Image: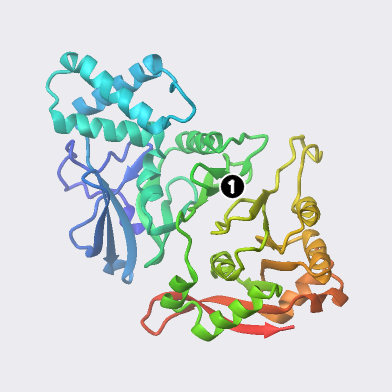
Amino acid sequence: MPFFGKKDKKESKKSTEDISSEDSPVVFFPVKPEYELLEEYWVKEPFSKVKIVRIEELGGQYAYFVEEVQMTEEERKAAQKLIDILSVELQPPESFEEDVRKHVIDEAHRLIKKYRSAMRGLGEESWEKVVYYIERDLLGYGPIDVLMNDWNLEDISCDGVNRAIYVWHRKYESIPTNIVFRDRDYLREFIIKLAHISGKHVSAAFPIVDAMLPGRHRLAATFGEEVSPRGSTFTIRKFRERPFSIIDLINSGNIDLWTAAYSWIMLENRMTLMITGTTAAGKTTLLNSLTRFFKPSFKIVTIEETAELNLPHENWVQLVSRESYGLGETKAGEISLYDLVRLSLRYRPDYIIVGEVRGAEAFVLFQAMATGHGGLSTMHADSIERAIRRLTSPPMNVSEAYIPSLNFVMLTERTILPSGGFGRRIRQVWEI
């Protein structure tokens, strides 16, 4: 990005209060005085803050700047020494129920008291910064920890080395950040860390990972230059702890009152629905919100590749597919969406929800709907004609005779609002 270039040689030398060194593997570029500040807010006060700016020299483009409290050289040495001691002296929690994060932080405070006299010259404020960075780097996500803790963000995306990390902000849409990975090896190690905390393996032999991070955030990543020539990449789709309710969607204009009332009548009577739209059109968000219209007595089974749905329903069975444990083309241990849809019929559900249909699972879902089961799903299509064409073509291969089993279809789109911003809207509803 042009505004993340090297500093002018005339600028003063960096001090310990600078944002970061450009020689470090990850660089946090500072906000320049000429940038117009639009908004700022704390993520973890008083240690980390976010600033949203407009850059006129780039045609008024928005950018997302992370500012964290900086450590002096003495504080960095103290933090590293504590991390080294923790790696040797840290004992596991006494019980599985104990909060691991709290346990590590308590141990860090204990070690600070124990070795404080040997690390003279640091005040209380300095030790607070040291604990913040220990928590950030050991228990958090390191350079992207602020992004992971900002509830305004939906997606975090790194396209490789020497490229700004992009985020999807709920208010400003897709914007670049001031964070840039500069070292290929460091980025590889970071991808390995993300994979490991997800319980997955990634390497040159298996350079693609699709996994679930703690907190149910969805990770998709590539390792090295095997499949991504610019270097390792990753995208994290953040999980929203409190999902959007139907009231939230009505207030934001995503769905109008008449369509909401119509959906309520249909779903309360076990009608079947397919939500269509392009990428990032809000299909899963809409599907999740519409499940509020189910009767409390309904038994629900959800089937997904990665658990994204969050239903406020007591009688809910959540099923997630599993990749093969074998090497190469072997399928040992694989449990596909097709297998899970077939299994779900044994649960006697009132509704079967498939997060997204793309393959043979669509055929089984339509068979279930034809036998009287309620069914909900999403798929990528920008019109009813293309949706039906996809359903009746390989690899879904749904017979045209089963299409009437689908009661109604909704098309949701990302659109430019009259105010100049972006929003998601239900454009059309069809009855089959």
Estimate the x, y position of residue 171 in percent, counting from the top left: 37, 67
Q: Residue at x 69, y 79 (%)?
A: 408
In-front residue for pair 318/426: 318
Q: Is residue 280 left or right of residue 395?
A: left
Q: In this view, which residue lies farthest toward the front?
A: 297
The image quadrant that residue 348 belongs to is bottom right
Which residue is at the front of the view, 158 or 287? 287
Q: Is residue 257 above or below residue 351?
A: below
Residue 261 x/y as whole percent: 55, 82
Frontmost residue, 355 versus 208: 355
Q: Secondary structure at mark 1?
A: loop
Reading the image, the residue beneath label 1 is: 228
Q: Quadrant of the N terminus?
A: bottom left
Q: How is the image coloured?
A: rainbow
User: Does residue 325 appear left or right of residue 249 in this picture?
Assistant: right
* Residue 231, visible in the rendered structure: no
Q: Amino acid at mark 1?
A: Ser
Above-or-below relation of 195 to 307: above
Residue at the spot x=12%, y=22% of the render?
Answer: 121
